[in-house]
Amino acid sequence: MVEIWKKRWKNSEVRNVSPINNPELKVPGFDLPRALWTTLNRASTEQGKCNYLMHKWGKVESPLCACGMYQTIRHIVDNYRPQTYFEGGLEKLHKAEEDTVKWMENLKLRL
């Protein structure tokens, strides 16, 4: 069963798979408190509560950010300065280092 799963993982087109070299190992930040882990996981997978996705799901009227751009997770992390910008972007965020934890603790949005 494990071999079948490994083969499917290897052959699938998984979004944001580059930070994950071995899907059998815990990813950085796995042992963070639940609220922080949830934020990190949602940001890393780009599947958090942003206006773009909430609009897609019929939960908000507009997919736009206050700045007028589509409010995607990538926009929140990489572009929305200075409100939510994270130096190093999603790749660095995935490492769950001390500056990542501080950023998540101070983030005004709930992903």
Image: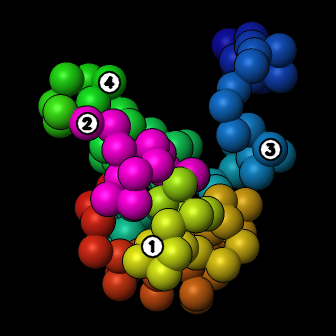
Q: Residue at x 35, y 76 (%)?
A: 107
Q: Quadrant of the N terminus?
A: top right
Badge 1 amino acid = Thr
Q: Which residue is mark 2?
A: 62
- Is 14 included in the stretch rendered in magenta? no
Q: Which residue is mark 1?
A: 84
Residue 15 is marked as none
Look at the magenta stretch and give its main secondary structure: loop
Label 3, residues with CA under 10 Å away: few <14, some 14-19, many ≥20? few
Give the mark toward the camera: 2 or 4.
2
- Is 72 included in the stretch rendered in magenta? yes
Give the mark toward the camera: 1 or 2.
2
Q: Earlier in the sequence, mark 4 or mark 3?
A: 3
Residue 40, horizontal then vertical, whole percent: 48, 61
Left or right relative to 50: residue 9: right
At numbered mark 2, what does the secondary structure look like: helix, strand or loop?
A: loop
Q: Which residues are magenta?
A: 62-74
Residue 61, placed above or below residue 5:
below
- The alpha-carbon separation of the residues under discs 1 and 4 comes to 22 Å
Badge 4 amino acid = Lys
